[in-house]
Image (spheres, rainbow, N blue to C red):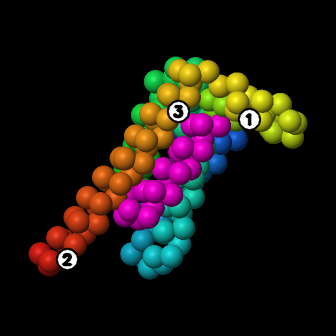
Amino acid sequence: ILLTVILYFKVSKELFLPFLCYSLTTFALLMLLLFKERLNSELLFKGMVVLQLIFEVLVETGIMAASGRAESPFVILFLLTIVSASLFYNLAGALLVATLSSLGYASTIIWGNLFAFRNLLSVNWIKNIYQLNDPDFYRIFLYLCSFYLIAFLSGYLSERLKVKGRELS
């Protein structure tokens, strides 16, 4: 993944660090999966999955900011991350990742670019929130509702699947 990102896509400077962290975390998680039986450390594995999910949301936020913000077709990636979080951490994990995804999505729309932190230190960012036009407001509302709906559904189904699995074994 790391070589593909660096050599093929030639990522912009703003996205290079999140892509690098995500690629290294993905590689570390893969190595943990390969050597899971030898290491026998469940806590390390769960911690790596948490880091993976956090970096995944950050990278998806960066991709969305770089590819059209509100009109980006990559918003669907947030939903996939929420579903994958529910497989590991059930309903609670899905809701936490839905919250992170909501913050990433809404901040990209409201502030225009998540990587422009200098705007957060001024009073102008409050004006941007109140000057949000109706289509952007409803777009944010619709996506936030869908993030939490998917989180509830996938988390509930994941918990039911684990209960049924225990009953069958």
Amino acid residing under circle 2: Arg
- Of label 3 and label 2, which has the lower sequence position? 3
- Of label 1 and label 2, which has the lower sequence position? 1
x, y percent for residue 48: 53, 63
x, y percent for residue 163: 22, 72
- Magenta stretch: residue 26 in it? no
* SS class, disc 1: loop
Is 65 drawn above or below residue 162 in the view shown?
above
Q: Magenta stretch: give its range.
A: 86-107
- Of label 3 and label 1, which has the lower sequence position? 1
* Residue 115 tag number: 1
Answer whether labels 3 and 1 touch (C-beta < 8 Å): no
Residue position for label 3: 140
Amino acid residing under circle 3: Ile
* SS class, disc 2: helix
Q: Residue at x 54, y 67 (%)?
A: 47
Q: CA distance from mark 1 to mark 2?
A: 45 Å
x, y percent for residue 167: 14, 77
Structural crowding at the residue carrying mark 2, measured as other residues with C-alpha within 10 Å and reported as few (<14), some (14–19) or many (≥20): few
On screen, residue 101 versus residue 163, left or right, reads: right
Residue position for label 2: 166
Front-most of residues 147 and 113: 147
Amino acid residing under circle 1: Phe
Structural crowding at the residue carrying mark 3, measured as other residues with C-alpha within 10 Å and reported as few (<14), some (14–19) or many (≥20): some
